[in-house]
Image (cartoon, grey):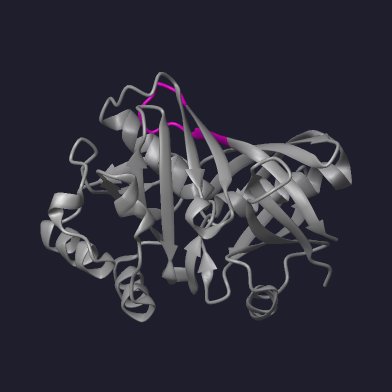
């Protein structure tokens, strides 16, 4: 089974979040996909097979299937552009349909996805306290202008915004305890963030749910955050920029375009660089 390795949301020719991409004649079995994802060892591997004019896609982390993965979708868009030329590709996920666009340009490929619909739900105060303790924070570390929430754009993410860049840089947690909490609550990631300005954010994403301590770029969580900012009427002026992975030494850049209609898709874009075929 041929696996392409592509870093999504790169900072030009550097950084980004590596994903595996498998383009096959038909989707492999669950057992095969889980085995390949564990062998590849990246936070996610996307598996795609053409069905008519669309592409059926499933995402696997080293530990489990994930309902939606933004950076692996960007990597898939780059792979499809390399194979079939520039274009917009329709994708069929486990729950819903989206598109990804890929445009080739020298060593990097521009790619953009349209996320699933967004929504957010309140998070119980005891759960917020438990999550803060997990990461060694207190309520005094929170930026309450963007209150804790469960944000969704194809998957659920706990969003905890912090009031200093230093607090974000100090992120650490017990992996086993974090994985147990995230699996129990269905949080695919915990997004910790800091608003540098109203339109520029720094984020870190704990991904113990999928068997990975931290993701250097998370398109699904970025879309979920953007959808939440729209709901609270944050002054985003139509788009935000995300810097992620900097504290891991894998600086990644993501852009989210926010249409005014509540719940509508978020366009998340960036560049991708091929690591190996």
Name of the residue lying farthest toward the front: 166
The part of the image, by quadrant, that contains residue 47 is bottom right
Name of the residue lying farthest toward the top: 237
Residue 87 colored magenta? no
Instruction: In the rendered view, tell whether residue 223 sits above or below residue 127.
Output: above
Type of secondary structure dominating the magenta stretch: loop
Q: Position of residue 93 (x, y in %)?
A: 58, 53
- Tally the numbered discs: 0
In the figure, is residue 155 to the left or right of 235? right
Residue at 74%, 44% in the rendered image: 13
Q: Position of residue 92 (x, y in %)?
A: 63, 49
Q: Taking the image as drawn, is residue 77 in sight?
A: yes
Instruction: In the rendered view, tell whether residue 172 sits above or below residue 119.
Output: below
In the figure, is residue 44 to the left or right of 232? right
Q: Taking the image as drawn, is residue 51 in sight?
A: no
Span colored in magenta: 258-268
In the figure, is residue 275 to the left or right of 223? right
Residue at 71%, 51% in the rendered image: 76
In the figure, is residue 12 to the left or right of 262? right
Residue at 52%, 59% in the rendered image: 248
Q: Nearer the viewer, residue 140 or 263?
A: 140
Instruction: In the rendered view, tell whether residue 255 sits above or below residue 6.
Output: above
Q: Position of residue 270 (x, y in %)?
A: 63, 38
Instruction: In the rendered view, tell whether residue 199 sits above or below residue 125.
Output: above
The part of the image, by quadrant, that contains residue 188 is bottom left
Q: Nearer the viewer, residue 75 or 95?
A: 75
């Amino acid at each position: 089974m041929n696996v392409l390795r592509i870093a999504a949301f790169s900072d030009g020719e550097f950084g980004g979040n590596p994903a595996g991409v498998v383009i096959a004649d038909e989707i492999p079995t669950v057992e095969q996909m889980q085995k390949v994802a564990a062998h590849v060892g990246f936070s996610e591997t996307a598996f795609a097979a053409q069905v008519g004019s669309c592409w059926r896609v499933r995402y696997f982390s080293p530990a489990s299937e994930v309902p939606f993965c933004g950076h692996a979708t960007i990597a898939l868009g780059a792979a499809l552009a390399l194979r079939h030329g520039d274009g917009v590709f329709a994708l069929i996920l486990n729950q819903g349909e989206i598109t990804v666009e890929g445009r080739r340009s020298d060593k990097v490929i521009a790619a953009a996805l349209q996320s699933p619909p967004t929504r957010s739900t309140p998070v119980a105060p005891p759960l917020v306290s438990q999550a803060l303790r997990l990461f060694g924070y207190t309520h005094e570390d929170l930026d309450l202008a963007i209150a804790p929430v469960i944000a969704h754009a194809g998957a659920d993410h706990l969003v905890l915004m912090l009031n200093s860049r230093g607090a974000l840089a100090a992120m650490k947690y017990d992996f086993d305890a974090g994985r147990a909490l995230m699996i129990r609550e269905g949080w695919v990631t915990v997004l910790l963030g800091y608003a540098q300005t109203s339109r520029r954010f720094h984020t870190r994403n704990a991904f113990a749910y999928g068997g990975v301590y931290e993701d250097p770029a998370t398109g699904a969580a970025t879309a979920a955050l953007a959808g939440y900012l729209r709901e609270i009427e944050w002054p985003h002026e139509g788009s935000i920029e995300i810097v992620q992975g900097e504290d891991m030494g894998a600086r990644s850049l993501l852009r989210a375009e926010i249409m005014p209609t509540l719940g509508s898709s978020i366009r998340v874009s960036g560049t991708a660089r091929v690591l190996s075929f």
